[in-house]
Image (cartoon, coloured by chain):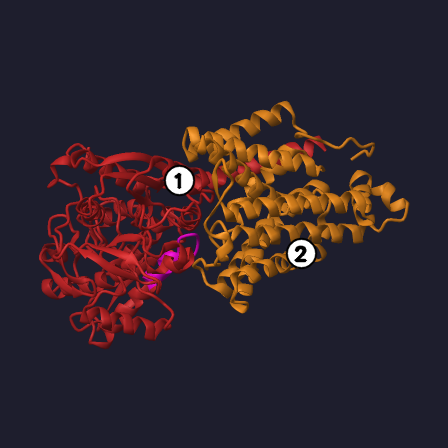
Chain colours: A red, B orange
Amino acid sequence: MRRTQRRLLGVTALLSVAVLTAACGSRTGDTASGGGGASCVDTSGDSVKIGFLNSLSGTMAISEKTVNDSLNLAAEEINAAGGVDGKKLSIVTEDGASEPTVFAEKANKLISADCVAAVFGGWTSSSRKAMLPVFEGANGLLFYPVQYEGLESSPNIFYTGATTNQQIVPALDYLKEKGVTSLFLVGSDYVFPRTANKIINAYAAANGIEVKGEEYAPLGHTDFATIVNKVKGAGAAAVFNTLNGDSNVAFFKEYKNAGLTAEAMPVVSVSIAEEEVSGVGVDNLAGQLTAWNYYQTVDSPTNKKFVEAFKAKYGADRVTSDPMEAAYTSLYLWKSMVEKAKSFTPDDIKKAAGGTSYDAPEGTVTVNGDNHHIAKTALIGKVGADGLIHTEWSSGQPIEPDPFLKGYPWASGLAG
Amino acid sequence: MEALFGQLFAGLSLGSVLLLAALGLALTFGQMGVINMAHGEFMMAGAYTAYVVQGAVSDAGVSLLLSIPLGFLVGGVLGLVLEMTLIRRMYHRPLDTLLVTWGVALILQQVARDIFGAPNVDVKAPSWLSGSVDLGVAQVPASRLFILVLAVVAVGGLSLVLARTALGRRVRGVVQNRDLAETVGISTRATDKLTFFIGSGLAGVAGVALTLLGSTGPTLGTNYIVDAFLVVVAGGIGQIKGTVIAAFGLGLLQATFEYSTTASLAKVAVFVVIVVFLQIRPQGIFSIRTRSLA
């Protein structure tokens, strides 16, 4: 009996270690092939290969599958309209399996074995950081569609999601404009929330906003009674939420049950999009705020077309969200770059990229040639009773990307 | 003062959640010695039962009350099928059981994903369970109070069954000395099946309760399985009262640490406390003394 117990305890401990390492494991890819040799992209025929690299299995599949869907929609549309520079797109799909090392490996395969002209995908920062040396080493091109924590700029990556000054900073501007003088920060315990909160703290210090508390929950944390108790006790004017995944459900249920409301203490979230609303429950989210650059409800002719085409292809009950739109946009941006450069070669595309613009569903976006991010309009949205997010405030015009926050005096010292 | 009582309640509430998650395990793992990694997926099945029932019965209150027995049935039947097809073939191979049930857990998760889709689904709480209740010393969320009561009822019911019924006597007999129980004419096969049915059914009930607090998705169970095993191991194998004390003890410990430090650190601290405790007392809080040679 005693021996079995010991063994069982060992197994339990092993399991928890496995869970922990899975949560923080992000080895940088060691598969980067050296030397920026000539690309092997074949453009002689009437088609050209591109790669889609999303997690179609594992924990991230739930989110990345939606990005893969909108990439396929964009490719289909482009092919129906005659392709890119007269060449039809032929798609090579690879599964990143929610594992940074697999992303690096598959990126390498796409560039060197499949000879694709560009790769579209990635979601977590760890997957991007694992792929970065691969793309720089082989001089490939990656289009990354998700908002992230900034402080990065690679000549071989185009970032079509928001950097911090296009999402977090505008959200803080909005709160300040609304007269919010104190904040409580709640986030998951990993790189994005910690970096975001560093920025929020610097902003708050410079703008007379008091940060009354800062709490982190391990990824997958399911019991928010204590954190909500702390939020309640601190009495801040608003909560800034950088929680990720399932934790949001537990947090918002607890928040509502503790008697906290969107009217008395609004929560601004940066990881809750249309796709997540139904899982958290509209009842628990109605009236709360989000910060993104696109909502399904954005009123533009391109968006109307995008939403209609998406629903027609994947079902009327599907919704479109910011990362999906950024992925859709990334393929069209690449198309414009190729047509501007009149070449599929990464070096020519990089030279031609600056100033390329596309009339995206979110509005007009323009590529910044220096840091390879794109100028985007920031939108603060409010979750409606219909489960969609409605624009509450807009920055009015596209905000130039500033991944290292050089243009913000209060942020000096953050970039390190 | 309000914060103190609020926090005390948070600890008790977390304890009751752990207790609900671990109670069925105390039976299948504690009493029968089966390491069932799919226990969490039985909870997930219970949670989806609540979702399906809510689709059929629009009134959230009625559907919740209906879901509890139905969740028990769904979890129990899944457990029974697992026991009859796989587990009974490997009663004396705990590590094989662990691997096989882990595989079953992954299959069940994928099945849930295929049926209900990968995103979480929303189970609405009845209006009488949203908002908070004023207990005089603190405002406590009604849903958490409900779960606390449910956990107490479940433990009471299970203890009553084990202590007072013929079935309970048979279960205890088989746990204490399987060979002797067989010689006096108890069908250990039938007892095993029933015990597994009840243990898995309790997982289903836990799943229904968890829809009030957290997300309802394919991976719901994986969030709780490690904690549930910890509770049973710390409580002592073979005793329900050990599980109860361990669950509330760990809940209060986690809440206290979390209040004075952070959630991540509290998790580490609780692990350390358990490891140290088990070094001193490897048999857990309580253990059964038997004359069997096992």
Residue closest to the eye, B86 or A213: A213
- Disc 2 is placed on an element classified as helix
Residue type highlighted by circle 2: Gly
Report the residue marked by disc 1.
Answer: A24
Q: Residue at x 67, y 56 (%)?
A: B76
Q: Are marks 2 and 1 on the same chain?
A: no
Query: Where does the magenta region start and end?
Result: A57-68
Give the letter of the chain under mark 1. Answer: A
The chief SS type of the magenta part is helix
- Disc 1 is placed on an element classified as helix
* B166 is higher (above) or lower (below) than B243: below
Callout 2–callout 1 Cβ contact below 8 Å: no
Q: Position of residue B142 (x, y in %)?
A: 51, 48
Q: Position of residue A405 (x, y in %)?
A: 15, 41
Which label sits on residue B76? 2
Q: Position of residue A68 (x, y in %)?
A: 33, 62
Viewer-nearest of discs 2 and 1:
2
Residue occupying the far top of the picture: B280
Tell me the quarter of the picture where residue A314 sits. Answer: bottom left
Q: How many marks?
A: 2
B149 horizontally vs B6: left or right: right
Can the viewer see residue A294 in this picture? no
Residue closest to the eye, B198 or A4: B198
